[in-house]
């Protein structure tokens, strides 16, 4: 799965990441699938490939989907959680800069 789905830099795990690397790889795969389904609801003309989006996981259960340069795809935020036999990921839109809900806006 790694060679077909993940970019060379994935998963780029922060120190103290709470799950083993092999589980993190599965979380990245699940997050990419969630991104493709989310993107398909907004743009039915283009289906991104696995190499078109980089997923960055955070230890607190958040994630960021960053499009590859030149793809024209939108960035997105998301979350992940996993248990002993399951993984759940979700992707949602990033509000525009200046919006009070934007993740970089002051609180």
Image (cartoon, rainbow, N blue to C red):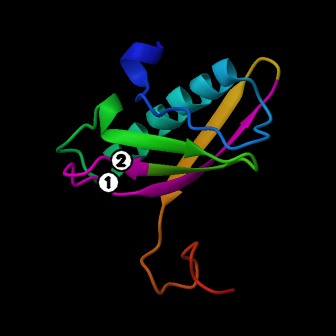
- Circles 2 and 1, Cβ within 8 Å, touching? The answer is yes
The residue wearing badge 2 is 39
Image position of 72 (left or right of 62): left
Task: Give the quadrant of the C terminus.
Answer: bottom right
Above or below residue 62? Residue 13 is above
Q: Describe the element under mark 1 as helix, strand or loop.
A: helix
Between 18 and 84, the one nearer to me in the picture: 18
Image position of 95 (left or right of 50): right
| Part of the protein shown in magenta | 66-83
Residue at left 51%, top 27%?
29
For residue 16, what is the image quadrant?
top right
For residue 6, what is the image quadrant?
top left
Residue at left 30%, top 39%?
52
Image position of 14 (left or right of 74): right
Residue 102: say if magenta: no
Q: Describe the element under mark 2 as helix, strand or loop.
A: helix
Between 67 and 84, the one nearer to me in the picture: 67
x, y percent for residue 28: 54, 32
x, y percent for residue 34: 49, 38
In whole angstroms, how far apart are the C-alphas of marks 2 and 1? 5 Å
x, y percent for residue 97: 44, 80
Between 85 and 63, the one nearer to me in the picture: 63
Above or below residue 96? Residue 73 is above
The residue wearing badge 1 is 42
x, y percent for residue 72: 22, 55
Between 2 and 75, the one nearer to me in the picture: 2
Image position of 10 (left or right of 51): right
């Amino acid at each position: 799965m790694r060679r077909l789905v993940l970019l060379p830099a994935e998963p780029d795990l922060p120190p103290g990441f709470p799950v083993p690397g092999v589980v993190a790889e599965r979380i990245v795969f699940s997050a990419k699938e969630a991104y493709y389904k989310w993107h398909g609801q907004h743009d039915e003309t283009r289906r991104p490939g696995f190499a078109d989006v980089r997923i960055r996981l955070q230890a607190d259960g958040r994630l960021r989907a960053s499009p590859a340069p030149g793809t024209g795809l939108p960035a997105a935020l998301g979350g992940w959680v996993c248990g002993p036999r399951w993984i759940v990921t979700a992707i949602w839109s990033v509000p525009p800069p200046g919006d009070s809900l934007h993740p970089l806006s002051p609180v």
